[in-house]
Amino acid sequence: MFRKTLLLLLAGLVAGSVQLSAQDDAPAPEPAPKPGDSAGPNRFWQATLAGGHYMVALDRISAVSRHKYLLDGAVIVDEVTVDSLGQALARFYFISPVTDAAPGNAVGEIAKRGRELVEKAADRAGTDAHNMVIKKYPDTSHARTIEYRLLSEKDLSALYASVRNAWETGRGRQFSAK
């Protein structure tokens, strides 16, 4: 009788553990894609932006980060960095004047209007200068650094979500923004 009870108890534990381990093997649901983000070629993350195109193998990415810093006391740089095994570091950033930090600020509104006028003039002239990375040689010359400028914080957030999702899941992604 004791053996029969022990055998039934042991069989129940084994059956329960098999059922529990089967539940652990289910893949985690993939987060909903952000605007501009879609499935891409397996093993790669790529970004197509106004300033160019970047592609990296997912197994070569060693770090993904996002941070903000104040540059020369005048602008806030919101930056996403994709570090990969190899010779290059990719930086994607959005720049905003410090005055933009205070909503309703008259100086911030003037700066915003000025940016709009520059963008319209660039469009009329057929140039893409307002989308380009700004460098001042030799101060900002970074060897082995690939840089892209995004024109909205929303696009930078979507880019960060895309690369992070691709790296965490191991599934290729494509991101695009103007």
Image (spheres, helix red, strand yellow):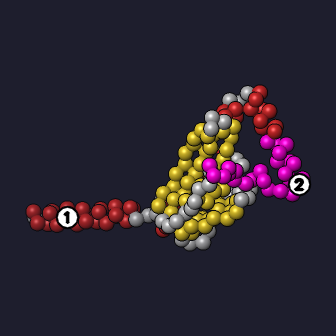
Element class at badge 1: helix
Is 59 left, or right, of 69 in this rendering? left
> What residue is shown at x 70% (from left), y 63% (from top)?
52
Residue 123: in magenta span: yes
Kind of residue sitting beneath label 1: Leu
Is 100 displayed left or right of 142 in the figure?
right
70 over 62 or under it: above or below: above
Q: Observer-nearest residue: 101 or 5?
A: 101
Q: Is residue 20 left or right of residue 168?
A: left
Q: Magenta segment, which residues? A: 115-139
Mark 1 or mark 2: whose residue is earlier in sequence: 1
Marks 1 and 2 sit apart, C-alpha to C-alpha, by 79 Å
Mark seen at residue 19: none
Label 2 crowding class (10 Å Cα cut-off): few <14, some 14-19, many 20+? few
- Image quarter hosting the N terminus: bottom left
**Which of the 4 image quadrants contains residue 20?**
bottom left
The residue under label 2 is 125
Residue 6 in the image: x percent, y percent? Answer: 14, 63
Q: Which mark is residue 10?
A: 1
**The C terminus - image quarter:** bottom right
